[in-house]
Amino acid sequence: MRSRLLSAPTGALLSTLALAAAASGCAGAPPKMTFADAGLLPEGAAALIAVEPDGPAPMPPVPVPAPESIASELPEGPPIDTVLVRFATEARARRGRTTVGRSFPPDAVAAWKVLAYDLDHYLARALPQTPLLELVRARITVDAEWDYDLRRFGAPPADLRSLVESRSARLAVRISAVRALGLGLLARTPAPKLRWPVEQAGISSLFGMRTHPLDHVRRMHFGVDLASGTGRVVGAAAKGWVVRAGWMGGYGLVVEVRHDGDLTTRYGHLSALLCAPGDAVDAGQPLGLVGQTGRATGPHLHFEVWRGGTPSDPLAWLGLGPLPGAGN
């Protein structure tokens, strides 16, 4: 879809973007980035992971304030997360079955070339379709998997090294441009209204602190448990993209769906999956079947709602309470 400019002359906009890209890339390949470096750690996360001390805040690479808004477009495809999750899973399996050597195996070379192709298509999207948090996740994943492969397989072919490192650098330039122009520039879609993922289900456990029924330890329960019979269909709470579908520890078989408004819903303890990462789903479309996989005392659906990396009470999003924050 062609961009629809909302303010600022075309020449001024192009000059602003050119200055942002030039200022970001003039120092050569940028250093690797963490979520802490990008200022994207959710509140309270610093106590859970080790982070380096913050340095001085960088000056924006544009000398004048950017226009108030630049474009509004519908997304052209799913989040890049779906591609990266699949790539990282396959890369871990590949390293596990390959002996330590001094050269990259052909299947690893081929996988990196496919990923570079996918990243090129992602970076060809308009700026509003590459949100900052998604860009940071992409660059962290690329850098981490590349480091793991280097330690496992040794020196890569020169053309492959250039291919991968140039994509990491392009992600860094896009991150710097988005940060310089300001998140207020980018088109933001409101969070959708959610529907019940299972019909005629009872609520067996609420969101909040509780004593866990298996280990009897008091801890936070990040969702609600919806009691229902094994095999009942679990539907998507709203339109979105599947970003995870598979086994995840105590959740058992789990599906995660990304929605507009930086909203993610999670469906746990499923007995079967009816979708795959990358699938586009409508509200109510089947994702899986109710089950008891993972750490569960009986068949039920564990349903979570996350927005911007923070969990919130699903009942509020289902219309049974006030939504967190103002203006949601």
Image (tube, rainbow, N blue to C red):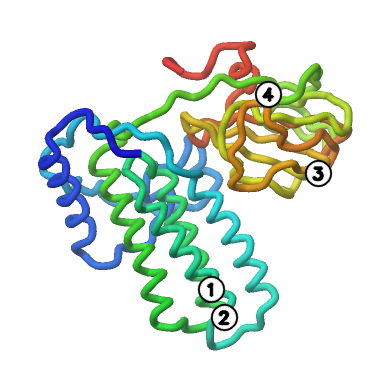
**Residue 207 got which mark?**
4
Q: Which of the numbered marks, if any, corresponds to residue 294?
A: 3
Q: Name the quadrant of the N terminus.
A: top left
**Tally of marks:** 4
Name the N-terminal-most of marks 2 and 3.
2
Amino acid on which disc 4 is placed:
Phe
Instruction: Tell me where residue 248 appears, x and y as whole percent.
Output: 71, 48
- Alpha-carbon neighbours of circle 2 within 10 Å: few (<14), some, or many (≥20)? few
Label 2, secondary structure: give it: helix
Q: Is residue 149 depicted above or below 275 in this figure? A: below
- The kind of residue tagged 2 is Pro
Of mark 1 and mark 4, the one earlier in the sequence is 1
- Considering the numbered disc 4 on the image, is that residue within a helix, a strand or a loop? loop
237 left or right of 253 in image: left
Vertical arrangement, residue 79 with respect to residue 165, above or below: above
Residue depicted at 53% across the width and 86% down the height: 103
Q: Which mark is residue 110?
A: 1
Q: Secondary structure at mark 1?
A: helix
Using a 10 Å C-alpha cutoff, classify the residue at mark 4 as few (fewer than 14 neighbours), some (14 to 19) or many (20 or more): some
Pointer 2 residue: 106
Nearest to the eye among marks 2 and 3: give it: 2
Say which amino acid is labelled 3.
Answer: Gly
Secondary structure at numbered mark 3 = loop
Spatial CA distance of label 4 from label 2 is 48 Å
Q: CA distance from mark 3 to mark 4?
A: 19 Å
Mark 1 or mark 3, earlier in chain: 1
Front disc: 1 or 4: 1
Q: Are marks 2 and 1 in contact (CB under 8 Å)?
A: yes
Disc 3 residue crowd, few under 14, some 14–19, many 20+, Cα 10 Å: some
